Image (spheres, helix red, strand yellow):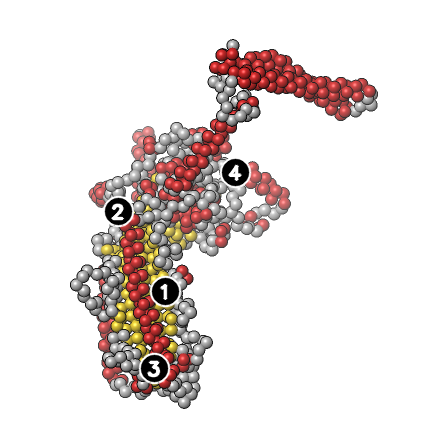
Amino acid sequence: MEVLREKVEEEEEAEREEAAERAEWARTEKMMRPVEVRKEETTLTQEMLRDLEKKLSEIRIPVSVEVPAFTKDTIDISMLPVSYKTNTPKEEQLLQLADNFSRQYSHLCPDRVPLFLHPLNECEVPKFVSTTLRPTLMPYPELYNWDSCAQFVSDFLTMVPLPDPLKPPLHLYSSSTVLKYQKGNCFDFSTLLCSMLIGSGYDAYCVNGYGSQDLCHMDLTREVCPLTVKPKETIKREEKVLPKKYTIRPPRDLCSRFEQEQEMKRQQEIRAREEKRLKEEEERLMEAEKANPDALHGLRVHSWVLVLSGKREVPENFFIDPFTARSYSTQDEHFLGIESLWNHKNYWINMQDCWNCCKDLIFDLGDPVRWEYMLLGTDKPELFLTEDDSGINNEDDVENLDKEDEDKSFDMPHSWVEQIEISPEAFETRCPNGKKVIQYKRAKLEKWAPYLNHNGLVSRLTTYEDLECTNILEIKEWYRNREDMLELRHINKTTALKTDYFKPGHPRALRVHSYKSMQPEMDRVIEFYETARVDGLIKREETPRTMTEYYRGRSDFLSYRHVDFGPRVKKLTLSSAESNPRPVVKITERFFRNPAKPAEEDVAERVFLVAEERIQLRYHCREDHITASKREFLRRSEVDSEGNKIIVTPDMCITFEVEPMEHTKKLLYQYETLMHLKKEEKLSRRQVWESELEVLEILKLLKEEEEVHTLTISIYDTKRNEKSKEYREAMERMMHEEHLRQVETQLDYLAPFLVQLPPGEKLTRWQAVRLKDECLSDFKQRLINKANLIQARFEKETQELQKKQQWYQENQVTLTPEDEDLYLSYCSQAMFRIRILEQRLNRHKELAPLKYLALEEKLHKDPRLGELLKMFT
């Protein structure tokens, strides 16, 4: 019974323990559930669990159809260096430290994801992420600043999405491999960009964190293109002019105030309705543009670059997205959290809470509470602790602590990646295959490499009216290396207006050309570089019936000329615009103030009414006057119908003088002024005709340039410049021929003797024999001289050794051990030189007869002497 009772008690105890475990598990499961679920229900049945699993299984991650492949199978690892395929002992030690660090981190923070420490490289070898960075300063000045580096990385590489959007990649390739294949994921982008920024002197770090869906997918369809953002115009405040003491009061306003108030109310109601309509339209558009909720929001892994303030005069911390090359504030909503970050010296883990994205993060890497670092010896300063806080009270403890830190410190190994190199061809090409397309919100940006398009097009920005990008609003095209200096073309599809912008250097000094049609006598505006023109023309505006020109810096102070044309007279024969110009109806000219003349004699405006045969003058106004003098001349012919000369009468000039008592103009002055104005009218009409011809020539030149599309090539561009290439090949060919000639001359034994003979003379048998004998005699003498030289050096070394031995015999008693060592060293070296000279002399004696016979045989076989020597024998 007691045994049975014990068994029953044991079973009851087991049941109680099992019930306690179930209660504990239920309580733990309840704490792990979301807050909303705990508020709505207390228990979760099996059916609800199955329903939840079903809903989760229905979630699909959107993946683009055409994903660029960039895997290990597509990489050729046969030519990679040894550092890519193996690890050094120091790297193996670093990997062990990283594993130990990862185990401790997983034990202390079991709810955190595993660390991204040592992914595999392209050779399936684990490499620590800090050693994958290779700080490099590029040799191109354009890649010295962070924005140009980021833009180059964004343009040069093609984005490859992560295999799993919820986890970091298993492989992290070297920057050299990424540059070679021009593909990579966000971690490859960040590694390359961070290496370039650190090499340029920035305090940059690679970040492993979480980003928004648009950021991870490089989706810019909800972002405004930076090229479409207009800079803010600074509004200058106009200074109030103080009223003069004796100014004329304005006339009294006789309008009804009641009517004005009613009109103001009506305008306010209209503006309120319009603002309400615009607000509703804006809300509707924002609702249409709003992205669908992301099921993986806050879980998508992304990598970017963090730049800290301090170095390179960076005022504040900021992020760089390597996909788009755009900079963001550390408070931006696209960045949802940070797990870790690293540079080429250390690795840090973020210990701060990211419930509010990255807005509350403090990037003080020297704070061990907020950032846990892996290796000691980091260059970031640690927080200062007082003696009481640190628990260190004496100098011995400080020394022991320093020794412990020194023992635990570990220097980061050098990078295993090869030197990052970008060839000039790759730097110029930039984009993969020379072309890249970026889709923005209501805009599309296309980029091309220079010289890829025959017309020099390097970039095109197309702006659309709707989000579907179907209705085009305007197009901007950027050109480079154009011979006609065309830099930008702006096409407005709504108004059909085209505007061309030119760089300095155009044959006609064009700066801007706005037009709707290239046909002459149509609406157009042409602006010029006034410093490149002699006449100081700045702008010319043309319509079918008018032409307006603006000038600056002329000696005659002309600033403005406006011409009104009449309908062209129709002719029976076919005629061009040059032979049948438009008749001039009116010419209006305005002038700047000439300080050398009095204001009442300085013409401000001159109007030639050609059809009415009248000339109107308006003079400048004096500072102490409120109006200006005016004159009007009736331009009549100098002779009447009968041939009699017409005398100028006072009624032919209508004058308004501000001060008639000060200046009384006689009839002679009016006659001279009229004659001068007639000459000026003829000159102005001729200048108008020349302006029309110039417009025709400009249009003709622009049409020819647009058809030809000639591109300029620098003389230093040896690959594209054909003339330079031909000249270089010719110079190389000449240098090669000269080298061959020099080599032949050096090996020709007969050359010194053939020079003594008259040029062009044919050799005789006796001359051939004499040349052979002289050549052999000279060679024999040179062999003897060489033997004598070796013999003389041998005898000299022997004599010096004998003298040294004699000196040693005489001073052997008084020599110190150091002197004896020097003597023995000298004797050893002298015997070595004597032995070498003896061997050279013996070898020369053995080879001299053989060389003599070889030369004799060569002379017999020489085509210049061989036949003659055979005839002689």
Q: CA distance from mark 2 to mark 3?
A: 103 Å
Looking at the image, which is closer to me, 390 or 402? 402
Q: Nearer the viewer, mark 2 or mark 3?
A: 3
Q: CA distance from mark 3 to mark 4?
A: 93 Å
Q: Answer yes or no: is residue 790 visible.
A: no
Residue shown at 30%/37% (left/top)? 69
| Residue assigned mark 1 | 538
| Callouts 3 and 4 close, C-beta under 8 Å | no
| Residue assigned mark 4 | 411
The location of residue 752, given as percent across then percent down, is: 56, 24
Element marked by disc 2: loop
Looking at the image, which is closer to me, 212 or 551? 551
Query: Would you say 614 lies left or right of 194 here?
Result: left
Residue shown at 55%/51% (left/top)? 384
| Callouts 4 and 2 close, C-beta under 8 Å | no
Q: Nearer the viewer, mark 3 or mark 1?
A: 3
Which mark, residue 631?
3
Residue shown at 40%/78% (left/top)? 602
The location of residue 864, given as percent across then percent down, is: 49, 19
- The mark nearer the N terminus, 1 or 2, is 2
Looking at the rendered structure, the number of numbered marks drawn on it comes to 4
**Residue furthest bottom in the image:** 661
**Residue furthest left in the image:** 572
| Residue assigned mark 2 | 43
| Callouts 1 and 4 close, C-beta under 8 Å | no
Q: Amino acid at mark 3?
A: Arg
**Residue furthest front in the image:** 643
